[in-house]
Image (spheres, rainbow, N blue to C red):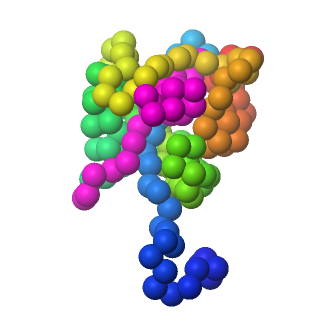
Amino acid sequence: MDQTHAAGSSSAQSEPLVVVAAAVVQDGRLLVVSKKAAPEVFYLPGGKPDADEGARETLMREFEEELGVQPLDPRFLVDVEAVAALEGVPMRMTVFQARLSGTPLPAAELARMRWVSGREKGLHLAPAVRDHVLPLLRQRGVLAA
């Protein structure tokens, strides 16, 4: 589709970054996390699939590694195309809506986690969350005002 790159260009990225994430909402607040590499930027918990790993398997592995919990009853919410907040490249993020098996605690490369309405002053959300996921969750009436 992208015809701006010359054939054989080694710097061209033809496929978007693939990410699987979950929107977890409790008491009208969305769970967001930040990485140690950029602790000021918050995004949905999840990550990139390993080779031959399906979306749900990716979600289970990433939640266990990063938060020490499992996503319960993950249901497809939306596919989002946006620019990845940390990598600055095109991204395709499959988002599920899920509950948690217990109390999450940040681990691995995560720096912090927060429960947010999305309207907090000074909160720096990844573009995919800010522009796509939050409006959808608000439209569905699951986020606090």
Q: Residue at image x 36%, y 16%?
A: 105
For residue 30: magenta?
A: yes
For residue 115: magenta?
A: no
Question: In this orientation, does residue 121 appear?
Answer: yes
Is residue 109 found left or right of 9 in the rendered image?
A: left
Is residue 41 found left or right of 108 in the rendered image?
A: right
Q: Main secondary structure of the magenta part?
A: strand
Question: In this orientation, does residue 14 appear?
Answer: no
Is residue 97 found left or right of 138 in the rendered image?
A: left
Q: Is residue 140 above or below residue 112?
A: below
> Which quadrant, please, contains the N terminus?
bottom right
- Toward which corner of the image does residue 129 lie, by quadrant? top right
Q: Residue at image x 64%, y 79%?
A: 4
> Which quadrant, please, contains the C terminus?
top right
Residue situated in front as seen by the camera: 133 or 122 = 122
Q: Where does residue 99 sit, x and y in percent of width and height?
A: 42, 24
- Toward which corner of the image does residue 65 lie, by quadrant? top left
Q: Residue at image x 51%, y 73%?
A: 12
Residue situated in front as seen by the camera: 81 or 110 = 110
Q: Where does residue 38 sit, x and y in percent of width and height?
A: 51, 32
Residue farthest along the left direction in this orientation: 52
Residue range of the region highlighted in magenta in the rendering:
29-52
Q: Is residue 144 above or below residue 60?
A: above
Residue situated in front as seen by the camera: 107 or 97 = 107
Q: Residue at image x 61%, y 77%?
A: 2
